[in-house]
Image: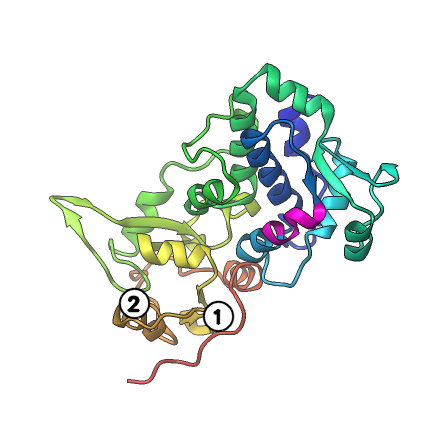
């Protein structure tokens, strides 16, 4: 099986559109470490903290452990684990991985392929990002794992995947009258809007459709906070702000904390509001922790 196809078909736990990016995050991390040191190993005890931070920052809101992908990624043929006793993983238990001296690395055939074709690493990373995370997070994820942040062309394999609708951005911005649905920002340079983006509520990577009822017009700041789970949309199309968010400046209070409980700005009459199913998915799979109570005047 070709490496792009194998990585695209990583076996993951799935149920009702739930996010399970554990293996993709470990593989991105391993690719970044390979880029820095192609011959280096990854002892579980040395990388556990890094992997836990990645899962906390970019994984689903529920508690999870890096031991799960460290053990199970072996089954996909892209990763190997050895212990003090020899080849093979001791299991997915944290204590077993720590006490057995478990060490992981990319599978030998994959390492050889990466050495033969230096461009393959970028294509694999681009594929993982495209399949599992929204574009607003790609740059910071690359930085977090030590990969180049430039967009990567994934070649002919990309054509076989679901295509985005190029009209999505314009349709969503028109529906919200070129205003951020959270703060009302409506900046332009001449006739062109600037700093306004079409955000998918249910991520495109998780079968989110390119429809107005799955879109929000957001400014760049609030788009990033929405995709990071700081902001959400609750019942009555009111804004959710995570209690996990901390900000002491006046800007943080005014642009984030004060939004709690406010109604969305838009969409205009006749345009579909965000569908409940997509709101619920975002609240379940992306939004962090509990919402703050509505801000008081």
Place of residue 38 in the rendered image (x, y in percent of width and height, measured from the top left):
61, 27
Q: Main secondary structure of the magenta part?
A: helix
**Mark 1, residue position:** 244
**Mark 2, residue position:** 255
Q: Residue furthest top?
A: 116
Numbered label attached to residue 69: none
From the viewer's perspective, is 188 left or right of 224?
A: left
For the rendered model, the colour scheme is rainbow
Place of residue 284 in the rendered image (x, y in percent of width and height, measured from the top left):
58, 63
Residue at image location 52% in from the left, 39% down from the top = 129
Q: Which residues are magenta?
A: 44-51
Of the 4 image quadrants, the one containing the C terminus is: bottom left
Place of residue 186 in the rendered image (x, y in percent of width and height, measured from the top left):
21, 56
Q: Is residue 219 visible?
A: no
Q: Residue furthest right?
A: 85
From the viewer's perspective, is 90 left or right of 117?
A: right
From the viewer's perspective, is 169 left or right of 34?
A: left
Residue at image location 60% in from the left, 53% down from the top = 55
Query: What is the tally of numbered marks visible in this picture?
Result: 2
Place of residue 11 in the rendered image (x, y in percent of width and height, measured from the top left):
72, 40
Ranked by sequence position, the earlier of labels 1 and 2 is: 1
Q: Element type at marker 1? A: loop
Residue at image location 68% in from the left, 35% down from the top = 41
Residue at image location 45% in from the left, 37% down from the top = 164
- Out of 276 and 85, give the one closest to the viewer: 85
- Out of 196 and 257, give the one closest to the viewer: 257
């Amino acid at each position: 099986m070709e490496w792009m196809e194998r990585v695209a078909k990583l076996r993951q736990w799935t149920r009702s559109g739930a996010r399970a990016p554990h293996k993709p995050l470990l593989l991105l991390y391993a690719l970044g470490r390979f880029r820095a040191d192609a011959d280096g190993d990854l002892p579980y005890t040395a990388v556990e903290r890094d992997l836990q931070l990645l899962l906390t920052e970019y994984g689903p809101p529920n508690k999870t452990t890096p031991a799960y992908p460290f053990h199970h990624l072996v089954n996909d043929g892209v990763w190997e684990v050895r212990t003090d006793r020899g080849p093979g993983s001791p299991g997915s238990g944290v204590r077993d991985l720590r006490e057995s001296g478990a060490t992981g690395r990319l599978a030998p055939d994959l390492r050889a392929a990466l050495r033969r074709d230096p461009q393959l690493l970028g294509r694999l990373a681009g594929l993982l990002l495209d399949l599992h995370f929204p574009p607003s997070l790609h740059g910071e994820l690359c930085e977090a794992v030590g990969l180049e942040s430039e967009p990567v062309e994934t070649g002919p394999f990309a054509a076989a995947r679901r295509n985005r609708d190029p009209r999505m951005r314009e349709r969503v911005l028109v529906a919200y009258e070129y205003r951020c649905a959270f703060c009302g920002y409506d900046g332009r340079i001449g006739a062109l809007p600037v700093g306004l983006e079409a955000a998918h509520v249910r991520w495109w990577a998780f079968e989110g459709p390119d429809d107005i009822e799955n879109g929000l017009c957001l400014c760049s700041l609030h788009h990033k906070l929405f995709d990071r789970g700081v902001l959400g949309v609750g019942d009555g199309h009111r804004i959710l702000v995570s209690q996990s968010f901390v900000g002491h400046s006046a800007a943080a209070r005014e642009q984030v904390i004060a939004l709690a409980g406010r109604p969305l700005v838009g969409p205009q009459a006749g345009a579909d509001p965000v569908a409940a199913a997509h709101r619920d998915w975002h609240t379940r799979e992306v939004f962090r922790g509990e919402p703050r109570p509505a801000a008081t005047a």
